[in-house]
């Protein structure tokens, strides 16, 4: 399966080692929630996205890197709206969101973007929501996996109606972000047997 295939060409060591940064961001968040409670919050997409990015970089896996990089955009926007503006600046969460976004953009310049990356990002989002549904406390409502987001409860009569609309909105958002990155950093090559590794992708001779 393409999702489990790594880079066709060798990802330079400096890029691979950059994967230690998002993993360290996740570690800082872990320490924060260990001290102040709410370890279930580690299952938020933004936090797990740092793990995905870190692993993807360390093993040189372009699909993982692209999926994680796409998620840094809505993750950063939601953090600004729901955390930064109402609660102010906190070191661990700022590191996770701003730091993760910066690493994601640097990595994306190297691995580029393809047309299917948004689908992998969407699949990752569904998996993290399922994990949050079963592994996190309901009162935390991590990844909106347990109940309707506050403020929308008057619009929707049931959680599952809200969930369907949410998933459709997420899919469209990820597609738009993927398209934007495709215009900025397109993966202009294709993978074929016998192709020559050159640049960020395998080029057709």
Image (spheres, rainbow, N blue to C red):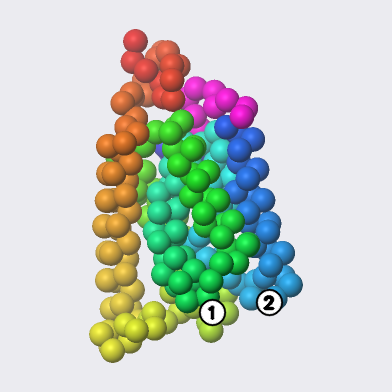
Taking depth in this image into account, of 74 and 198 the one nearest to the observer is 74
- Magenta residues, dominant SS class: loop
Give the residues drawn in magenta, as a range.
Answer: 5-14
> At which x and y percent is residue 116?
32, 42
Which image quadrant for residue 18?
Answer: top right
Tags 2 and 1 touching, CB below 8 Å: no
Taking depth in this image into account, of 3 and 116 the one nearest to the observer is 116
Residue under the point 53% across and 71% down: 88
Residue under the point 61% across and 29% down: 14
* Quadrant (top left/top right/bottom left/bottom right) for the C terminus: top left
> At which x and y percent is residue 63?
44, 40
Residues under labels 2 and 1: Cα distance? 11 Å
* Quadrant (top left/top right/bottom left/bottom right) for the N terminus: top left
Q: Secondary structure at mark 1?
A: helix
Residue under the point 41% across and 69% down: 81
> Does 7 appear in magenta?
yes
Q: State the residue lying farthest toward the top.
A: 205
> At which x and y percent is residue 111?
44, 32
Q: Is residue 205 left or right of residue 30?
A: left
Write down the residue under mark 2: 37
Local crowd size for mark 2, using a 10 Å CA cut-off: few (<14), some (14–19), many (≥20): few
The tag earlier along the polypeptide, 2 or 1, is: 2
| Label placed on residue 89 | none
Q: In the rendered view, would you say 140 is above or below 79?
A: below
> Does 60 appear in magenta?
no
Q: Is residue 62 left or right of residue 156?
A: right
Any part of residue 42 in sight: no
Q: In the rendered view, would you say 74 is above or below 135?
A: above
> At which x and y percent is residue 91?
63, 62
Write down the residue under mark 1: 140
Any part of residue 84 in sight: yes
């Amino acid at each position: 399966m393409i999702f489990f295939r790594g880079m066709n060409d060798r990802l330079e060591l400096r890029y691979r080692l950059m994967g230690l940064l998002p993993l360290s961001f996740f570690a800082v968040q872990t320490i924060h929630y260990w001290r102040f409670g709410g370890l279930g919050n580690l299952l938020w997409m933004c936090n797990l996205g740092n793990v995905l990015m870190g692993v993807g970089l360390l093993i040189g896996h372009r699909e993982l890197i692209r999926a994680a990089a796409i998620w840094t955009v809505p993750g950063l926007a939601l953090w600004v709206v729901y955390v930064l503006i109402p609660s102010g600046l906190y070191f661990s969460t700022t590191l996770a969101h701003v730091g993760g976004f910066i690493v994601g953009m640097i990595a994306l310049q190297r691995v580029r973007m393809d047309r299917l990356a948004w689908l992998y990002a969407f699949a990752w989002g569904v998996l993290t929501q399922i994990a949050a549904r079963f592994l996190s406390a309901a009162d935390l409502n991590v990844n909106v996996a347990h109940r309707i987001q506050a403020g929308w409860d008057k619009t929707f009569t049931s959680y599952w109606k809200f969930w369907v609309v949410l998933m459709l909105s997420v899919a469209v958002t990820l597609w738009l972000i993927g398209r934007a990155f495709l215009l900025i950093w397109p993966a202009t090559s294709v993978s074929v047997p016998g192709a020559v590794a050159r640049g960020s992708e395998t080029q057709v001779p």
